[in-house]
Amino acid sequence: MHALLRDCRTGIPPQLEPVARAEGMDPARLTEALLRGMVCLPANPRHPCKAVPIGEGCLVKVNVNIGTSAPRCDHEQEMEKARAAIVNGADTLMDLSTAGDIPVLRKKILSLGVPVGTVPLYEAVRKAGSAVDVDPDLLFRVIREHCRDGVDFMTLHCGVNREAFDALIADPRLMGVVSRGGAFHLARMDQTGEENPLFSEFAYLLEILDEYDVVISLGDGMRPGSIHDAGRLAKTTEYLTLGKLSHICQEKGIQRLIEGPGHIPLSQVGYNVRIIKELTDHAPLYLLGPVVTDIAPGYDHVVAAIGSTIACMHGADFLCMVSPSEHLALPQLEDIVEGTRITRIAAHIGDGARKGVSWQEEKELPLVLARKDLDWEGQFRQALFGEHARSIHERDGATDTCSMCGDLCALKLVKDIFKRKRDEPEKKQQ
Ligand code: SF4
């Protein structure tokens, strides 16, 4: 059992008090939610970092993926992207590097003070030379190395098993498999005829994660890669397996996240979220997308924000940043900034749906009052990304209204009417 959960069993751990306050939660409720597996706190004791609880009752969190690829492998660029992600609202980072000196970059990212996740399979594939050549010993050795380095949570595609493979064959999909980890496991199963070791050796995997207090993120290697594939069998088969594995984690006291659900039409977002929650004993849900239309490459950050706000209404807890370069290229710095900001906005709207209208009204009232008063500095101070708002407002010169209506500013006209009305009785009295 993870050390934090052991502590929770004997009362409210003192370190949870400030964490609960920051979330607007009662510490007893947070402790209870951790024990019931409805919240997880990725915090490897070897890695000092900010406490970021994820799950029911908590604020919606944002993860940003960074990392090298073979065509673009520059540690400094990735670090710049990682720092920009944090400044623009990332709560956690995932290092998805697949090229260069992967352990060196991982250690640099771990120095940034936020929880860090990885997908150890990527490094194992690089070490082995191909997905087919990853033997179980190597994979578990890499997982252990990531734990020792201080990684706080890991995506492990334990649900991509032979049953899911059979479902994919029985009910083929237009896009096949779009998860890198999912495809690697399938390739190996296909060539060797063996089961995915992360599934067949799940008990051993949990022992490692238990030893280092690392959260498992049960990956969705069978997530649909187009809305055409949303209703196919492989995804549902994986959901059922993830439900069983989630239950085992909960029994053993291993904190877990569940990943889902990829490309699905907007009308199916709500029930997919509710089904995953139901099957996994309400484990924290980490969203990849959902991408609710396939027709807007270049704007998939907006597409995912639309899907994820709806998903948050139904119980999603943790959003993975989608950048404008999704499906097109490795994100550049400006893509990370734009994608992180849009995802942060989606998380805030999701919080409003989860925490209630009065919570959202209270948060937003200072900006609304500043807008009503044409108090531009006040608006920039209250806005999520105030300097961006300022740069737009000031591009036609700084004025008391804005260049949209200029001297016909509705706010100013009505403000003047009410000012006159207030002043008139005072004049009459004089
Ligand atoms: S000028 Fe128009 S758009 Fe600008 S603040 Fe006034 S009413 Fe709003």
Image: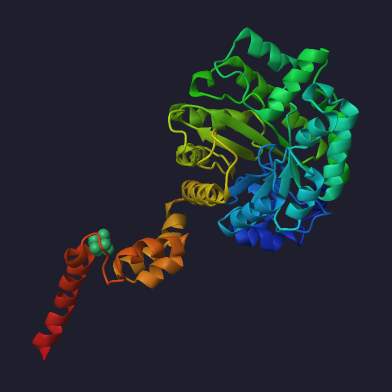
- The residue that appears at 84% across and 23% down in the rendered structure is 133
- Asked where in the image residue 232 lies, by quadrant, the reply is top right
Residue 214 visible in the snapshot: no
336 or 27, which is in the foreground? 336
Question: Picture coordinates of residue 262 (x, y %)?
Answer: 56, 30
- Left or right? Give the position of 347 relative to 388: right
- Asked where in the image residue 293 lies, by quadrant, the reply is top left
- The residue that appears at 50% across and 39% down in the rendered structure is 308
**Please, which colouring scheme is shown?**
rainbow
Question: Which residue extends farthest left?
Answer: 428
Question: Picture coordinates of residue 426 (x, y %)?
Answer: 15, 85
Residue 128 visible in the snapshot: yes
153 or 95, which is in the foreground? 95
Query: Which quarter of the image is occupied by the N terminus?
Result: top right
Question: Picture coordinates of residue 342 (x, y %)?
Answer: 49, 48
231 or 79, which is in the foreground? 79
- Left or right? Give the position of 308 relative to 106: left
- Left or right? Give the position of 245 relative to 277: right
Question: Which residue extends farthest top?
Answer: 170
Please determine whether, in this image, residue 91 is positioned above or below residue 293: below
- Asked where in the image residue 386 lies, by quadrant, the reply is bottom left
Please determine whether, in this image, residue 115 is positioned above or below residue 426: above
Query: Which quarter of the image is occupied by the C terminus?
Result: bottom left
Question: Picture coordinates of residue 274 (x, y %)?
Answer: 55, 31
